[in-house]
Image: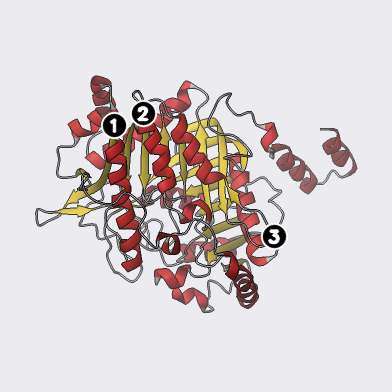
Amino acid sequence: MTDFQAIADSRTTASTIDFITRAARRTTTADVATLPGGIIRPGRNAWQVGRADKAAFLVDGAAYFTALDQALRKAKDTIWIVGWDFNPDIRLRPHQSSETLGELLLSLADENARLQIRILVWGMGPVYSGKSLRLFRESGFSAHPQITMRFDLRHPVRGCHHQKLVSIDDSLGFLGGIDLTARRWDEPDHRIENPLRKSPDGTPYQPVHDMHSMVSGQAAMLIGDVARRRWKRATGQKLKPAMTEGASWPIGIAPDMADATTAIALTEPGLIGKRGHYEAFRLTRDAIKAARKLIYIETQYLASFGVARAIGKRLKEIDGPEITVLVTKSSHGFLEKLTMGNNRDRLIRRLKRIDRYDRLRVMYAVVPNQHGDEQEIVIHSKLLIVDDHFVRVGSSNLNNRSEGLDTECDLAIEASNDAHRDAIEALRHRLIAEHLEVTPAAVRDMELARRSMNDAIEALNARGRGLRHFAVDIANGETTPLIGTGLVDPRRPYWPLQKLRLRIGRLAAAIF
């Protein structure tokens, strides 16, 4: 600390003291001890590692939006919003207020002349989603002098920006699977008739299950670093971290963990002359390889044959872990149905043929509708839990493009004490209980009685709301990727078009 002391002796202003305080809290990967023999390995499956003073798991959009609303109101210096899409017309607290996200950000900027709000959206996100095309036009929101919005087109051909994060003052960080856009908000009951579950234009949408995380401390600073890193790559502008004491943890949100080892894993495709980052896929594969008792997965897509190979190896073992995978059943759009849906069925068929010890369950979630039928719940979360010792929450799906074409970001926590393990186990029980419409205590007690996660799920899966097995013909059918998968769901950029793509990206960044 001698260098810091010299600065303090020569400049005793309040800003310098703030700088010292903030700089002392920052860390490098080398400063944080990972667990001996643990899953997280900096330089292989982790971009950076830091301590989370507090961490919370925010299950479903309502929980995330509520926590975010409270956190945004505490912002003092900077707000970063980075996502696949963004819509300022969504409401964060539809039960309590008609205020939109855009109106909230405008009021925060008007009340605090120091506050800078920067929003980075995938350049094709508003076009692809069809939910926020008006962002391309000037409005009172995007024209505010303290609010800067940019559209990111610095990606390989067919690649997209898929990270979903918010950073507030480098003190609070949010990372997970939920974009700040339409069709993301829902409550844990996922009931069919919910008048609040509608897009800003009033169009209702089907139930959707998702999750996010909130962290403070060094882990939050790393999320801020990811935002600045992405901003620089998209715009060329290099910005410094916040150097004032930032936002405090929201009073109404109880943390699930304290003082936890947290890793950030990235997927960034290499551009011409630059190496990429592929920690996220390695982290998933290493976690599956390390499992001893159980693997619990929630994923929008199950179409990665690389992940299938890792799971298949575990299923061949006599004493390997039991595995539960929750995935969305329906596919949207012709190409998605053709590739993601077909490859999912082929992948399940392959794994079921390997599963001679009957330890694999691949299921989708449903709720009853008013006609006595079942309505599927869209599983949009990207979650992996291993042995109630490791949890990963982020933007990475289990498909090819998330492994090396799209830009992804995941947050992982590895337990270092009993309290951490209890928190991860409680999260898993809470998720299973939500899908089965029972209490977390019922899941816990049934697991203890049956000594099995899968058997507990089967025993409790007796209501109209519950989990359903995929009906896949195991004996007949293909088990290899569909022809043309490399074009629709590629793992790596198509290099011959990269130079042209980069030029287009630079031109678009200059225009927007």
Task: Measure how far apart labels 2 and 3 are at the Cα level.
Answer: 41 Å
Q: Nearer the viewer, residue 226 or 22?
A: 226
Side of 361 relative to 125 (left or right) = left
Q: Report which quarter residue 463 is drawn in.
A: top left
Disc 3 residue type (three-letter): Gly
In contact (CB < 8 Å): disc 2 and disc 3: no
Q: Is residue 215 above or below residue 488?
A: above
Query: Which numbered dot is residue 321?
Result: 2
Q: Is residue 152 above or below residue 24?
A: below
Disc 2 residue type (three-letter): Pro
Q: Which residue is mark 1?
A: 359
In contact (CB < 8 Å): disc 1 and disc 2: yes
Q: Position of residue 376 (x, y in %)?
A: 23, 53
Q: Position of residue 152 (x, y in %)?
A: 57, 67
In contact (CB < 8 Å): disc 3 and disc 1: no
Side of 325 relative to 99 (left or right) = left
Q: Which label's residue is closer to the chain start, 2 or 3?
A: 3
Q: Residue furthest left?
A: 372
Q: Which label's residue is closer to the chain start, 3 or 1?
A: 3
Q: Quadrant of the C terminus?
A: bottom right
Query: Which numbered dot is residue 110?
Result: none
Circle 2 SS class: loop
Q: Nearer the viewer, residue 198 or 355?
A: 355
Using the rendered image of the protein, determine whether residue 434 is visible from the camera's viewpoint. yes
Circle 1 SS class: loop
Disc 1 residue type (three-letter): Arg
Q: Position of residue 141 (x, y in %)?
A: 53, 71
Q: Which residue is mark 3?
A: 273
Q: Position of residue 385 (x, y in %)?
A: 41, 35
